[in-house]
Each structure stands twice: as C-alpha cells, then as structure tokens.
Image: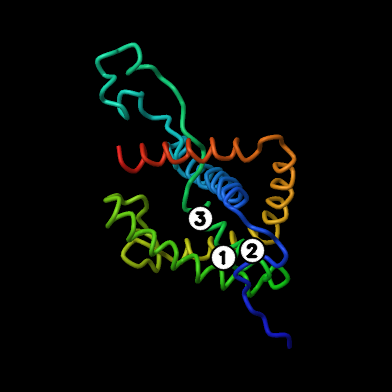
Amino acid sequence: MKKIKPSFFLSGYKKNIYNIFSYFFICAFVGWVFETTVVLIQSGHITERGLLFINHNPGYYFPLINSIPVISNLPIIWGLPIIGIYGIGGCILVFTFGKLDKHPIILFFVGMIFMTIFELVSSYFCEEVLHKKYWDYTADFLNFQGRICLRSSLAWGVLSVLTIKLLKPKLELIYAKERRIRNYKILIIIVMAYTVICMLIKFVL
C-alpha cells in the first residue's frame, strides 16, 4: 500500500500573495453562501454575517457622521459577502492537503480533525484578542465549551472533501483567468485593501 504524505504545497504550482488571496476570497465567499443559506433555512430570514453589513446604517459604524442625519441614517448594504474563517480554512486545506484528492475517506477524517482544531483555536483567538464570541455550540450534542461540536466537525469533514475534490480545480481555473486580466495584480491589491478596511470596521470599530 502506497504511503500517503500530506503535501504542504501543491506540487508544481507557484504560489504568491495574489493567488493565495484569490483562493481566500473565493473560499470565504462560498463559506458565506453556505452559512447564510443554512441560517436562512433555520431562522427564515437573512442575517448579517461575515463582512457584509446590512443591519445597521453608516452612523452605527462611523459615529462621527451622526451629526449629518441624511448620511448617518442612509440605508445601505455594503462590505463584502465573505466569512474569513472559511477563507483561511479553505487555503489551509488546498495548500496543505491538496494531494489527498484521490483519497476522499482519509481526506474526510484528516479535514475533520484538522479543521476542528482550527475552529477551536479560532474561538479562543476571537474571545481573547477580539473580545467577541461569534458562535456557540452549547446546545449541540457532544460539544466542548460551546466552541466545537460533533455536528460542526462532521460538517468540516464534508466541506474538506468538497473543497479539494470540487472547489480546488475551479480555484485554479479562476486564477488562471484572473492572470490574463490586464493589471490584475492592481485589482487584487485594491480588493485586499478594501477587505482589510472591512475587517477593521468589523473587528475593531
């Protein structure tokens, strides 16, 4: 039986900040669609998730403009429909376990364990550094401190397989097309800068 070794880099694939961010952005968007859809089915309405701001007027995020009612009370939808944990998790999976695409069962369990640990660490980071608690699995079966649970771990396993088997080839095609766009690096840098601004507003302001 051939021994399987997880690859920390995709063989023969050159990585740089531009394609890493592209992968991050697409995975984060797919994660936003997935989570928003699940919550929509459960609650019956769209909730404000990730870096997409829909529930508050500009004055909520920028108190300095509250003196201008026309602007501060203007109903707008802005930000980005992405959830960072999915973007980071997707990049980790693609660049770390890309060579497990021929072994879905192993990929399921490796992804489930690895991403559950990632979610646990992320939970501590959010509480200790950002002083926020973005999810709580206290009511779920087999949970640990409400930070991780069996249902979430199984979901991570499934998402790991789908990411490597279905999404990774699409990511490579999309990035190949992006590189043919004139000044694509400048466009990616602009999106990166806007993403950082949205993150600062979300996690700091």
C-beta proximity under 8 Å, tags 2 and 1: yes
The residue sitting at 62% across, 68% down in the picture is: 97
Residues at marks 2 and 1, CA–CA distance in whole angstroms: 7 Å
**Residue with the mark numbered 2:** 161
| Mark 3 crowd level (few <14, some 14–19, many ≥20, 10 Å Cα) | some
Q: In which quarter of the image is residue 101?
A: bottom right
Residues at marks 3 and 2, CA–CA distance in whole angstroms: 16 Å
**Residue with the mark numbered 1:** 157
| Mark 2 crowd level (few <14, some 14–19, many ≥20, 10 Å Cα) | many
Mark 3, secondary structure of its residue: helix
The residue sitting at 36% across, 59% down in the picture is: 123
| Mark 1 crowd level (few <14, some 14–19, many ≥20, 10 Å Cα) | many
Left or right of 2 on screen, residue 40: left
**Where residue 47 appears, x then y in whole percent?**
43, 37
Left or right of 127 on screen, residue 32: right
**Residue with the mark numbered 3:** 88
